[in-house]
Image: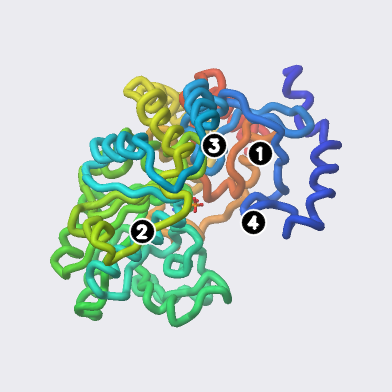
Amino acid sequence: EAEESVFLARTAESRRVRAASADVLPGGVASNWQDAPPGAVWISHGAGSRVVDVDGTSYVDLHGGFGVGLAGHAHPAIVAAVSDRVRKGTHFAQPTEDAVVVARELARRFGVPLWRFGNSGTESTMDAVHLMRAATGRMKIIKVEGTYHGHHDSVQVSVYPGPEERGPAGRPYSVPVGPAVPPALAQLTLVVPFGDLEPVERLLVENPGEIAGMIIEPIMMNIGLIAPPDGYLAGLKALLHRHGAYLAYDEVKTGLAVSQGGATQWSGVVPDLICLAKALAGGIPCGAIGGVPELMGIIADGTYEQVGTFNGNPLTMAAARAMLFDILDDAAYRHFERLRRVMSDGAEEILHRYGLPGHVRSYGAKGAVVFHDRPLRDYRDFVAYPDQWGNAHWLYQHNGGVFLPPWGKCEQWTVSVQHTEADVRRFVVNLERMAAHLR
Ligand code: PLP
């Protein structure tokens, strides 16, 4: 209680830094999505399961840096690996053996043999699109309406399209995210609703020999959390292959968080390409793309130049190695499961007891309270329900000392190996406080 009374009481430093940011950082932040309502939270440091803002207020961190935070903050294994590497030099533009070790472990976990590295999720999904195009000589791809795959042109299409531009539900239009995306390029990205095979089949039939492949989040995040219907992923893979096209999973959020081998292992359906980033290097920027020899083989022969100054950077690879071998072991996933149960069961019980509209969806280290009385199937379901409860929830969590990602309606919580049951019970307590006040 004593700790709670300080929440939002101290803001002087946050105000000072915010005021100093506006004339040098566009929008006052380093990335547009850091400026979500009610404004950026200026962080001083993180420790274990907590982040501390510049005013000294400490929060249980369930934001997890948009899903990066499976290790928590300043994990001793990451500190040790990174410190050791810093002393030995951090960049040579030549590979270190850690890259081999990390690639082999990803191959074991995800079931595809060949891996390359980059620096972000955007680069991973860009490589996936490029690889499918280069391997097939076909230029069109399919993506799901309402999915964010990063900020390269081919996937900056129908991410959050407005009502007047979306087109018919079964046949969504290809809507460029903004004026920076060339309309001619956007037309190469065909759009389908999540969870339905029929629109995919129709596109494949209507565009014979033109579709290189499909990129999809196997468990849809960024719009709450929507699991694929039974048989959907297996059906997609079979359908695409029948038409000479490939299947790429964007596991930037799900990979390593949902299970040891991500949504690939969780679903049992191994795609042709897998994109990773976020959690992989314990808070150091890293991306990875893995795949079958048919596709990844065209990297080695130069058909597709997968390149980057910082690819396989020694610091990144040392951190990723520590993450995979010292942090994300069997015990970590048992821990995620224990925390998941506390949050999911606790939140479901409160929603039920107070008669709030909503349900919980959670997998491994990630989950979301979806404040809607029906399960969501796709983007259009998601945008059709109001976001007041999600916004109120964010505020109640924040004022109760739990830092969640912004846009209560869209985002997911992320727990780390350093979170405790007491940490996540706080989430449940805050939800109950909201229910008791507002119901
Ligand atoms: N794919 C998904 C599913 C994501 O959620 C994100 C980022 O939020 C990306 C790709 C892009 O990753 P990055 O921000 O590292 O470029």
Q: Disc 2 or 4, which lies upstream in sequence? A: 4
Q: Nearer the viewer, residue 209 or 60?
A: 209
Q: Is mark 4 within 8 Å of ligand 1?
A: no
Q: Residue at x 40, y 57 (%)?
A: 307
| Amino acid at dot 2 | Gln
Dots 3, 2 in contact, CB < 8 A: no
Q: Which residue is mark 3?
A: 64
Q: Which residue is mark 4?
A: 32
The residues bearing labels 4 and 1 have C-alpha atoms spaced at a distance of 31 Å
Q: Nearer the viewer, residue 179 or 301?
A: 301
The residues bearing labels 3 and 1 have C-alpha atoms spaced at a distance of 27 Å
Q: Disc 1 or 2, which lies upstream in sequence? A: 2
Q: Which residue is mark 2?
A: 306
Q: Disc 3 or 2, which lies upstream in sequence? A: 3
Residue 63 is situated, as x and y percent measured from the top left of the image, at 57, 38
| Amino acid at dot 1 | Leu
Q: Is mark 1 within 8 Å of ligand 1?
A: no
Label 2 residue SS: loop
Q: Quadrant of the N terminus?
A: top right
**Left or right, residue 245 beside residue 406:** left
Q: Residues within 10 Å of mark 2 (few under 14, many from 20)?
A: some
Label 1 residue SS: helix
Is residue 432 among what the camera can see? yes
Q: Which residue is mark 1?
A: 438
